[in-house]
Image: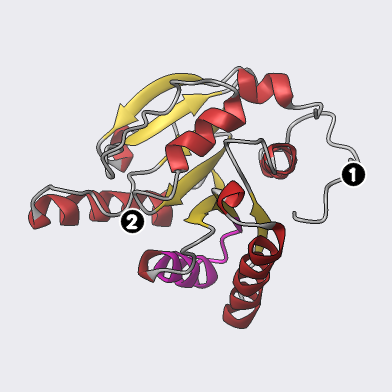
Amino acid sequence: MTPFDSTFQSAHFIKSAEKLSQCPLDQGVEVAFAGRSNAGKSTALNTLTNQKKLARTSKTPGRTQLINCFGLNVDDRRLIDLPGYGFAKVPIEMKKVWQAHMQDYLMNRRSLAGVVLVMDIRHPLKEFDEMMLDWAKSNRMKVHVLLTKSDKLKRGPAQASMFTVQKALKAQGVDGTVQTFSSLNGDGVDNLRIKLAEWLVLDNLEEIPVSPNA
């Protein structure tokens, strides 16, 4: 439990945007979730907010094809679900359009405080992940890597995967942190809420014990 649980549980859908100009007014603070289509991004958002259907999940990768915006019960604080990279079973030209809109958002959204980069702990640092880390370094953007599906690995291999990603961030000069996360057993949910509360500048931000995997 954290002082911010109720804030994240208050998350509610605002709108879906095809491009940056359709997003909510560029004011306040927001955090975006990005990741490959099968990394568990939408499921992580649902776990964070303790809601089963806030973010759309599907067994078919790439169902998140719009910029989905969610508000919190704090003025001008938002969570953003970016299109899943991969966009399975759609034309190449459509993929290029979605990628262009996502890049426009990442490059030009002034209220964006940081990006939660979601990776499957069993398959981290794929091409899209490396691309996002390069972008973060170039734009001096904070990144918090969420290694999902940690329940699929034993503690030793899970920690090894986390250390590998931490080493990669340091080598690339990225301002980032890494943690393990499981929607199945709740691993890392509190750590994620505390990190996001820091980025979103929520009240009651105090020195709260965080487990070593943050």
Q: Provide residue 176's location: percent of width, then percent of height.
A: 64, 63
Q: Is residue 24 visible?
A: no
Q: In this view, does 101 lie above or below 132?
A: above
The reply to whether the magenta stretch includes residue 132 is: yes
**Quarter-of-image position of residue 48:** top right
The residue where tag 2 is placed is 103
Point out the frontmost of discs 1 and 2.
1
From the image, tell me which residue sits under label 1: 209
Q: In terms of secondary structure, where does tag 2 sit?
A: helix
Q: Quadrant of residue 74?
A: top right
Q: In this view, does 71 lie to the left or right of 108?
A: right
Q: How many labels does the image show?
A: 2
Tell me which residue sits at (33%, 44%) in the image. 83
How crowded pointer 2 is (Cα within 10 Å; few <14, some 14-19, many 20+) is rated as some
Secondary structure, mark 1, is loop
The answer to whether 138 is drawn above or below residue 194 in the figure is: below
**Residue type pointed to by label 1:** Pro
Which image quarter holds the N terminus? top right
How far is the residue under mark 1 from the one under mark 2?
A: 35 Å
Q: Is residue 131 in view?
A: yes
Q: Considering only vertical position in the picture, is 129 above or below 88?
A: below
Q: Which mark is residue 174?
A: none
Colour mapping used in the image: secondary structure
Magenta span of residues: 129-145
Q: Residues within 10 Å of mark 1 (few under 14, many from 20)?
A: few
Residue type at mark 2: give it: Gln
| Rendered position, 152 above or below 183 | below
Q: Residue at x 23, y 49 (%)?
A: 87
